[in-house]
């Protein structure tokens, strides 16, 4: 097999593998544009129309209950994004409405039980439709990121309680996407800080020091000159006296 044929075969096999592992409705969206991000408290549910969890039918979107299907009290159905909890990231799409009353207390997202179990380290119990082995956690604080708004009615902004009825209002003014600085982008040029003014006292001290240096230098030069002059004058006196002595002797 030629090198080109081998590379083509590998690419096809890789594409098939990726396609097979991609979720049908809930994508992590990490490579998509961020439209909204925030945090809220999340609960969990699992409505499979069996009646075991108190549900009366399929989720509001008409999609069957599945991993990644979440309920929102105000976001448009089929809105997509992901949640992050303690470093774990899980994708979701809005396929149902809720929570109801809890949303008035700040519980603004109802994750499916399987996603909730994966985030909290528990396991999904198919008999009770609950989550076991996570220490009894039923509510967790999560960060959410919206990467795609659904096209139907609903608030395209920070979540609102179910009681506001925002889920039934068409929102034509979605939230302004947050400004995200991509990794590797060059930071804005920083202007050098202006030189700090030297205090007056420091300037005076510096001038006094310079003056003192000059005085010392001047004294040194003067002293040297005086020494030379003294030596010359003294020598002249000595010579004069010697000459006088010699004349007297004569």
Image (spheres, rainbow, N blue to C red):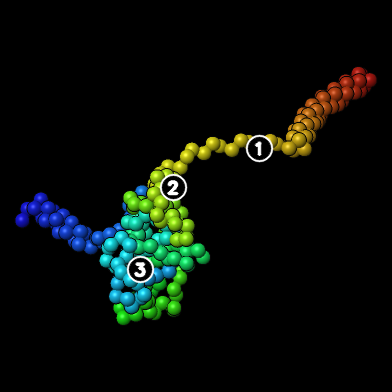
Marks 1 and 3 sit apart, C-alpha to C-alpha, by 60 Å
Q: Is tag 2's residue or tag 1's residue first in the polypeptide sequence?
A: 2
Provide the secondary structure element on which disc 2 rests.
Answer: loop
Residue wearing tag 2: 175
- Where is residue 145 drawn, in percent x and y? 40, 56
Q: Which of 127/16 is in front?
A: 127
Residue 189 rendering spot, x and y as whole percentages: 48, 38
Q: Quadrant of the N terminus?
A: bottom left
Label 1 secondary element:
loop
Would you place residue 240 above or below residue 148 in this image?
above
> Alpha-carbon neighbours of circle 1 within 10 Å: few (<14), some, or many (≥20)?
few
In the image, is 5 to the left or to the right of 249?
left
Q: Residue at x 8, y 53 (%)?
A: 5
Judge the density around disc 2: few (<14), some (14-19), many (≥20) Cα neighbours within 10 Å.
few
Q: Nearer the viewer, residue 43 or 13?
A: 43
Which residue is at a point 32% across and 65% down the rendered structure image? Answer: 59
Label 1 vs 3, first from the N-terminus? 3
Measured as percent of width and height from the top left, residue 123 is found at 34, 76
Q: Characterize the local packing of mark 3: few (<14), some (14-19) or many (20 or more) Cα atoms within 10 angstroms.
A: many
- Residue placed farthest to the right in the image? 248
Q: What residue sits right under mark 3 in the picture? A: 112
The reply to whether discs 3 and 2 touch (Cβ–Cβ < 8 Å) is no
Vertical order, 71 against 37 (above or below)? below
Q: Which residue is mark 1?
A: 196
Residue 97: x, y in percent? Answer: 38, 62
Left or right of 232 in this view: 109: left
Element type at mark 3? strand
44, 160: nearer the viewer: 160
Q: Earlier in the sequence, mark 3 or mark 2?
A: 3
| Quarter of the rendering containing residue 62 | bottom left
Q: In the rendered image, which quarter is residue 232 located in?
A: top right
Q: Quadrant of residue 230?
A: top right
């Amino acid at each position: 097999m030629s090198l080109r044929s081998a590379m083509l075969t590998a690419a096809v096999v890789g594409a098939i593998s990726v396609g097979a592992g991609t979720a049908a409705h809930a994508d992590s969206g990490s490579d998509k544009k961020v439209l909204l991000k925030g945090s809220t408290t999340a609960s969990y549910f699992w409505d499979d129309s069996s009646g075991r969890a108190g549900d009366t039918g399929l989720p509001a979107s008409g999609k069957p209950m599945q991993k990644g299907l979440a309920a929102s009290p105000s976001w448009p159905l089929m809105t997509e994004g992901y949640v992050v909890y303690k470093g774990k990231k899980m994708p979701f799409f809005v396929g149902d409405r809720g929570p109801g009353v809890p949303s008035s207390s700040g519980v603004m997202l109802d994750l499916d039980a399987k996603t909730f179990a994966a985030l909290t380290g528990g396991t999904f119990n198919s008999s009770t439709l609950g989550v076991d082995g996570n220490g009894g956690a039923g509510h967790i604080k999560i960060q959410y990121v919206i990467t795609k708004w659904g096209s139907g009615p609903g608030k395209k902004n920070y979540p609102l309680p179910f009681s506001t009825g925002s889920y039934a209002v068409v929102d034509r003014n979605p939230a302004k996407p947050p400004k995200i600085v991509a990794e590797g982008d060059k930071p804005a040029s920083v202007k050098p800080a202006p030189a700090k003014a030297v205090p007056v006292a420091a300037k005076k001290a510096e001038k006094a020091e310079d003056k003192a240096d000059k005085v010392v230098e001047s004294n040194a030069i003067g002293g040297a000159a005086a020494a030379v002059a003294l030596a010359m004058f003294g020598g002249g006196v000595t010579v004069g006296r010697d000459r006088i002595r010699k004349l007297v002797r004569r």
